[in-house]
Image (spheres, rainbow, N blue to C red):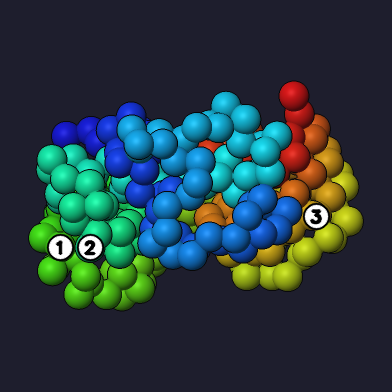
Amino acid sequence: MGERLLEADCASCVGLCCVAPAFAKSSDFAITKAAGQACPNLGGDFRCGIHERLEDKGFHGCVVFDCFGAGQRISQETFPGQDWKSAPEMLGLLAVVRQLHELMWLLTEALKLDAAERVHPKLRDELARIDHLAGGTPAQLKGLDVDGERQKVNPLLQKASQLARAGTPRKDYRGANLIGRKMRGADLRGANLRGALLIGADLRGADLRRADVTGADLRGTDLRGADLTGVLFLSPSQLRSAVTDP
């Protein structure tokens, strides 16, 4: 499998993320929009008319969203030469392909872990397999059990994480509700924070070296001054949703 861009390339997409999802007026979105309805800021060229001013205009949710490259794959490969107006069924596939691409991103990140070298062959095999699934026909994608595929991949990702975090204290906060928790300066080296709810938590100056933050909700998490050296599976969208140093 050749190297694939696993981040949004809006210039190669037809604005799928501006149409497919629904969102409600809130601190993340300035308006309410139904699923399948085009955002009023989307232009006829499938470009966002306020892309450089999203935060100022009240669309923080758009700023932190990342399709992991699913949008351009659907636009360029699954439905080449079409858009959601001529092929509206492509809208329903964005969530499916996005989840598959997120898995691919996680597998790619795991392959960067030298300490997990012994599972690299299995990681590469899974990466190729998930990439093949993401390239399926619309009918195949629609019928895909994405949760089942995630359950197949997760044990391997967890093994890679365990190998990479060996020798650290490895506190276990997996899936923990840490919303608003005061953890300033906490020693979280090698901690398991997979799926943890850290919304609005204070982690200023915390030591997060080699912590696993797969799927952790970092909205509003204060990470200023935190040591993020070698933190595992921290996506750009997670970082954008947190409060970080300038």
Mark nearer the N terminus (1 vs 2): 2
Count residues near mark 3 (Cα–Cα under 10 Å), then give few for <14, some for 14-19, many for 20+.
many
What amino acid is at disc 3?
A: Ala
Along the line of sight, the residue nearer the viewer: 234 or 30? 30
Q: Which residue is mark 2?
A: 89
Q: Is residue 215 left or right of residue 169?
A: left
- How far from the left and from the top, in percent, is residue 135? 15, 53
In the image, residue 179 sits, relative to residue 63, either above or below, namely below
Looking at the image, which residue is at 63% across and 55% down?
31
CB atoms of marks 1 and 2 within 8 Å: yes
- How far from the left and from the top, in percent, is residue 73? 23, 44
Q: Nearer the viewer, mark 1 or mark 2?
A: 2
What amino acid is at disc 2?
A: Glu
Q: Which residue is mark 1?
A: 138
- How far from the left and from the top, in percent, is residue 18? 44, 48
Count residues near mark 2 (Cα–Cα under 10 Å), then give few for <14, some for 14-19, many for 20+.
some
In the image, residue 98 sits, relative to residue 81, either above or below, namely below
Find the distance from the CA under tag 1 to the CA under tag 2: 8 Å
CB atoms of marks 1 and 3 within 8 Å: no
Q: Nearer the viewer, mark 2 or mark 3?
A: 2
Mark nearer the N terminus (2 vs 3): 2
Image quadrant holding the C terminus, namely top right
Along the line of sight, the residue nearer the viewer: 92 or 218? 92
What amino acid is at disc 1?
A: Pro
Looking at the image, which residue is at 84% across and 60% down?
181
Q: Which residue is mark 3?
A: 201
CB atoms of marks 2 and 3 within 8 Å: no
